[in-house]
Image (cartoon, rainbow, N blue to C red):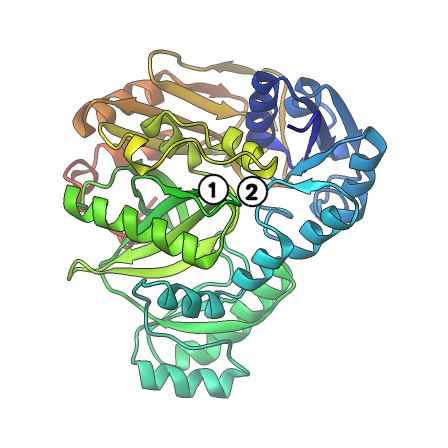
Amino acid sequence: MFSKILIANRGEIAVRIIRALSEMGISSVAVYSEADKNSLHRFLADESVCIGPGNAQESYLRADRIISAALMTGAKAIHPGYGFLSENEEFARLCEENGIAFIGPTAEIMHRLSDKTKMKEIACDAGLDTIPGTKALENLEEAVKEAEKIGYPVMLKARSGGGGRGIRLINGEEELKKLYPLAKAEAEQSFADGALYIEKYIVASSHIEVQVLADEFGNAVSFAERDCSMQRNHQKLIEESPSAKVTEQERKELMEKVRVATIKMGYRNAGTLEFLLSEDRKFYFMEMNVRLQVEHPVSEILSSIDIVKWQIRIAAGIPLSFTNKDIRTKGSAIECRINARSTGVIEEMHIPGGPFVRFDTFLEKGAEVSPYYDSMIGKLIVYAQNRDEAIRKMRAYLCELQIIGVKTNIEEQLRILQSRSFIDGSYDTRTLEEVSD
């Protein structure tokens, strides 16, 4: 097992990882930008190193500075969290070249799966149904021809990255001509890769994803599906597991299909396979995220399995000690993402507590919410014996959660939880786009 691990991230996920390391008896090293000099993750870690100014391009995205910090402090491994360099194969390769374990898939695996168009081919070979679409497009002219073949509406997507960036819904040729250069520019800015591809748009679909863990010995497990359909501008707001739309038999079959596909792909560590569930009950594979997901706590609280700890064990060469039969799928877990809608300093804060509830955050009184990073400042997660109880529980704890000093989306989350479409489980990926904020 590693004696010391550096966390190449910030915010709530850095705090989450540091706490897991503390429980495992592993020393932690935090990296922080000048904007995060007073952030909680810096002070929770055993050691901390400043790696640059507030701009992420000069700090959390500087692989050379992070590697230097790891070598300087004697860290034996690096956990990238999510976002930033977590899916950067060059960073994973740099870790390997410097004798530092990368807690995630190898650079070779990442390279093989990073091109989403090629990933679909791999998934198809592994027995998963895929959405009709193209390979990486050469130019706008090719995009127009391919969209005409597939038939509108279509989704224009970035080949690399995620988080809703570089994605556009296209309803016709003129719209494609207008939005293609915008999506390409956004992809280049976000992922340093402007390549785009087209997929058929599945109307009235649900965004379903399956968490996996896989070790180097050919073992893999899959967790109960998460429903991430409550989105605005392709940004997830609420996740729940299991999905109210998926039957027990469908769940069992999907978990096994994903487990087998993960093994066939030769994957290692934590990952997530994402699907669209169509009205005709077909699970269409979209992509695989080769990292820890923001919403991993939903699967953790439902299954009672610590995914972060298992990421670390797998990277240390420890085989999985459980199978799909050991993973709990009963009950209901819900996560609400708490986003800031302004910057500022936290003046007062009250975090609710109780059985089977957690609030993952980096906030504390005096903490600063800066303009440099993602707006998510916390995640409220609950578990209950059934979905109705979980919804009531989440409402109660959202009402109790108090964050004073910045504006948040807590009221919006309460409105969603009280909506008919969420209560009866009929919501899909279009629901929030059709409701004014």
Disc 2 element: loop
Q: Is residue 275 left or right of residue 67?
A: left
* Residues marked 1 and 2 touching at CB (< 8 Å): yes
Residue type at mark 1 is Gln
56 on left or right of 330? right
Toward the front, the furthest residue is 217
Query: Which residue is more in the foreground, 142 or 113?
Result: 113
Question: In the figure, 420 relative to 302: above or below?
Answer: below
Task: Kindly report the distance in space between the C-alpha atoms of the residues bearing marks 1 and 2.
Answer: 6 Å
Q: Say which amino acid is labelled 2.
A: Tyr
- How crowded is the residue under tag 1: few (<14 C-alpha within 10 Å), some, or many (20+)? some
Disc 2: which residue: 82
Q: Which mark is residue 293?
A: 1
Position of residue 364 measured from the top left corner of the image (x, y, whole percent): 58, 17
Disc 1 is placed on an element classified as loop
Query: In x, y percent, where is residue 205?
Result: 25, 57
Place residue 374 in its image quadrant: top right
